Amino acid sequence: EIDVCSNQDVANSTIAGLAEVVHKVMMANVAGVAMARTIAEAMQAVEAPIITIHATAEACGVRNGYDYVETLGVDRWLSLIAAYDKQKATCLVVNAGTAITIDALSVPKNSGHANFMGGLIVPGLTLMLNALANNTAQLSMAEGHVLSFPTNTQDAMHSGCLGAAIGAIQRQWQLLQTLDNQAPAIMLSGGDAAIIAKNLPEDLQPYAIIVDNLVLRGLMLMERELA
């Protein structure tokens, strides 16, 4: 079972209530050393060992094709692991949060493993909008709509940022399709997964799959492998 605590206060109260039953803590952190320290302090009440997960050369049937495997963000790595476990076929793994990562997972037929081929990191939708609003004199963060041919500034900003993200996804999908000679699924997770999936081109819509908490699913699979 996977659940998410919506804020730190809820997390702390939840942790306190689990002190008697938690035997192991799995940590995946991309927020820096200070956050890792905060998490460790919050977990002191549990008195269980903390196992920090990092990207490795191979785990759970996924082979890491990054030039320097340890520099791959653990969130991306866990998402790839979860995607392979769920799909068992070539797919594009898209995490749409502060940044949008678009990672290619190639699964050769009858191979029993997946290959992470590499991927893109682009600014998330809010980050793109903030960049426009904060670095130009005439643009603001006002609400806008997604349209094919916007006729006002707010709609143009929102449509442009979403279009940029979708364009990157579409290009990587085409490249992965050519590489593996098959139409890959597009597995989306993160806060902006729904709006991206809704606005994908019609020919890509059938391949879109939204999976909540993809990173946590990968963390659960890592715990099972290390048990």
Image: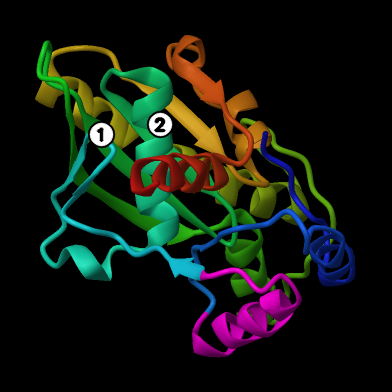
Q: Which mark is residue 26?
A: none
Q: Residue 14 location in percent, x, y? A: 85, 60
Q: Residue 50 location in percent, x, y? A: 52, 70
The amino acid marked with disc number 1 is: Leu
**Horizontal side of residue 104 vs 87, given as left or right:** left
**Horizontal side of residue 212 vs 117, given as left or right:** right
Q: Residues within 10 Å of mark 2 (few under 14, many from 20)?
A: many
User: What predominant SS class does the magenta segment belong to?
Assistant: helix
Q: Return the disc, 1 or 2, that comes first in the chain's sequence.
A: 2
Is residue 168 visible in the rendered structure shown here?
Answer: no
Highlighted magenta segment, given as a residue range: 32-49
Q: What residue is drawn where x is 18% and y is 23%?
A: 107
> Marks 1 and 2: CB-CB under 8 Å?
yes
SS category of the residue bearing label 1? strand
Q: Nearer the viewer, residue 71 or 11?
A: 11
The amino acid marked with disc number 2 is: Ala
**Horizontal side of residue 149 vs 220, given as left or right:** right
Q: Which residue is mark 1?
A: 105
Residue 146 belongs to the span the image colors magenta = no
Q: Which residue is mark 2?
A: 83
CA separation, marks 1 and 2?
Answer: 8 Å
Q: What residue is drawn where x is 53% and y is 39%?
A: 217
SS category of the residue bearing label 2? helix
Q: Residues within 10 Å of mark 1 (few under 14, many from 20)?
A: many
Q: Residue 61 location in percent, x, y? A: 23, 34
> Vertically, is 69 above or below 148?
below
Q: Nearer the viewer, residue 203 or 211?
A: 211
- Quarter occupied by residue 130: bottom right
Q: What residue is drawn where x is 26% and y is 70%?
A: 71
Q: Residue 104 location in percent, x, y? A: 26, 38
Residue 41 belongs to the span the image colors magenta = yes
